[in-house]
């Protein structure tokens, strides 16, 4: 069966190549069409406790006066997130490690500062530094 449209409106597959006879059912491409692309996989979920541990760990270093308490909370959240990461297979291990490390550093820094302040107040009540040093050496 012939295409009723004029030859100028027919596609290139309907027109014969120079010196070739027109074919009745000419295929436009010799290969079958490609299958559709598979859908994109949704991004993996990040553990929320890992995010909290990292934020609190950073805050334990940066925020003065309450860094000791925030650091301890960051360590607890990091430990909880490690358990959840093993159980659920979520992402966020790097954030949990960062929260743990920063929490330990913040807790250590503010523990040393607190210890220094306690020692400073303990020695500030005495009369002289020399008497305090002799009592320590004795």
Image (tube, rainbow, N blue to C red):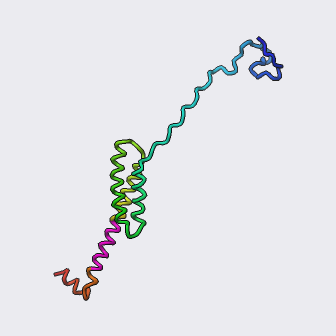
Image position of 45 with respect to 114: above or below = above
Q: Quarter of the image holding residue 3?
A: top right
Residue at screen point 38% across, 53% down: 97
Which quarter of the rendering shows the C terminus? bottom left
Is 94 on the left or on the right of 20, as rendered? left
Image position of 116 with respect to 70: above or below = below
Q: Residue furthest left?
A: 138
Highlighted magenta segment, given as a residue range: 108-121
Is residue 25 one of those drawn in magenta?
no
Is 24 on the left or on the right of 108, as rendered? right
Q: Position of residue 7 (x, y in %)?
A: 82, 20
Q: Quarter of the image holding residue 119?
A: bottom left
Q: Position of residue 135 (x, y in %)?
A: 19, 83
Residue at screen point 34% across, 64% down: 69
Q: Residue furthest bottom?
A: 127
Secondary structure mostly seen in magenta is helix
Residue at screen point 36% across, 54% down: 77
Is residue 112 one of those drawn in magenta?
yes
Residue at screen point 50% across, 39% down: 42
Q: Position of residue 17 (x, y in %)?
A: 78, 18
Image position of 73 with respect to 24: above or below = below
């Amino acid at each position: 069966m012939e295409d009723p449209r004029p030859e100028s409106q027919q596609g290139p597959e309907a027109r014969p190549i120079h010196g070739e006879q027109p074919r009745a059912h000419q295929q436009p491409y010799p290969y079958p069409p490609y299958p559709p692309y598979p859908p994109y996989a949704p991004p993996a979920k990040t553990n929320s406790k890992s995010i909290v541990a990292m934020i609190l760990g950073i805050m334990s270093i940066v925020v003065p006066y309450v860094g000791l308490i925030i650091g301890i909370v960051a360590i607890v959240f990091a430990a909880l997130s490690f358990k959840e990461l093993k159980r659920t297979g979520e992402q966020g291990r790097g954030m949990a490690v960062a929260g743990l490390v920063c929490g330990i550093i913040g807790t250590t820094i503010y523990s040393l500062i607190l210890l220094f302040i306690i020692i400073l107040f303990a020695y500030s009540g005495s009369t002289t530094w020399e008497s305090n040093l002799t009592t320590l050496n004795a």
